Amino acid sequence: METLAGIEETRVVIARRIKQLGFKSGTHLRRHFQEQGAVEALLVSHSHLQTRVRPASLAFAIMATEEGATAVLAQGSEQVVKGVTITLSSFRRPERNSRQGSDNDSKE
């Protein structure tokens, strides 16, 4: 999430259910998204558990422009990449709790 800190939300697309694309999911997703616009970065984190490594099930595509992200999402929330149906959504940062810590302040 730190990598996404300085990126406009409107340029980020979340891809879920990508595990079946395997360890080359980043390559497949980049090619798929580039059909709609330039991809600035693709963030995929494979799970490293003890001695096993598992393919990622989630990725963040950072498009070069807001229009690119909009074009990707306009193709539908479910898309097929290399025969695998993936789910796409726009990225929204969690809202910061403006009352964080106020529970402790109200106790007497």
Image (cartoon, rainbow, N blue to C red):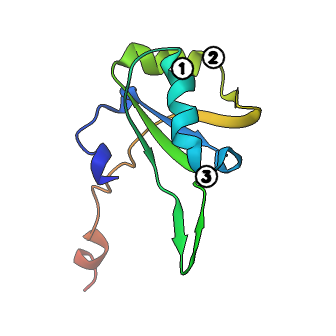
Instruction: Compare marks 3 and 2 and give the one earlier in the sequence.
Output: 3
Distance CA(mark 2)–CA(mark 1) = 6 Å
Secondary structure of the residue carrying numbered label 2? loop
Question: Hey, what amino acid is under mark 2?
Answer: Gln
- Left or right of residue 33, residue 99 in this image: left
x 57%, y 24%: residue: 32
Residue linked to disc 2: 75
x 53%, y 25%: residue: 31
Q: Residues within 10 Å of mark 2 (few under 14, many from 20)?
A: few
Q: Residues within 10 Å of mark 1 (few under 14, many from 20)?
A: many
Instruction: Compare marks 1 and 3 and give the one earlier in the sequence.
Output: 3
The answer to which quarter of the image holds residue 15 is top right
Foreground disc of the pair 3, 2: 3
Residue linked to disc 1: 72
Distance CA(mark 3)–CA(mark 2) = 20 Å
| Extreme residue toward the right, this view | 83
Q: Residues within 10 Å of mark 3 (few under 14, many from 20)?
A: some
Residue linked to disc 3: 57
Q: Position of residue 8 (x, y in %)?
A: 30, 31
x 27%, y 78%: residue: 104
Secondary structure of the residue carrying numbered label 3? loop
Question: Hey, what amino acid is under mark 1?
Answer: Val
Distance CA(mark 1)–CA(mark 3) = 19 Å
Secondary structure of the residue carrying numbered label 1? helix
x 71%, y 31%: residue: 82
The reply to whether the C-beta atoms of the residues labelled 2 and 1 are less than 8 Å apart is yes
Question: Hey, what amino acid is under mark 3?
Answer: Ser
Between 71 and 84, the residue placed more toward the observer is 84
Q: Which mark is residue 27?
A: none
- Left or right of residue 95, residue 16 in this image: right
How many numbered marks, from 0 up? 3
Q: Position of residue 27 (x, y in %)?
A: 52, 36
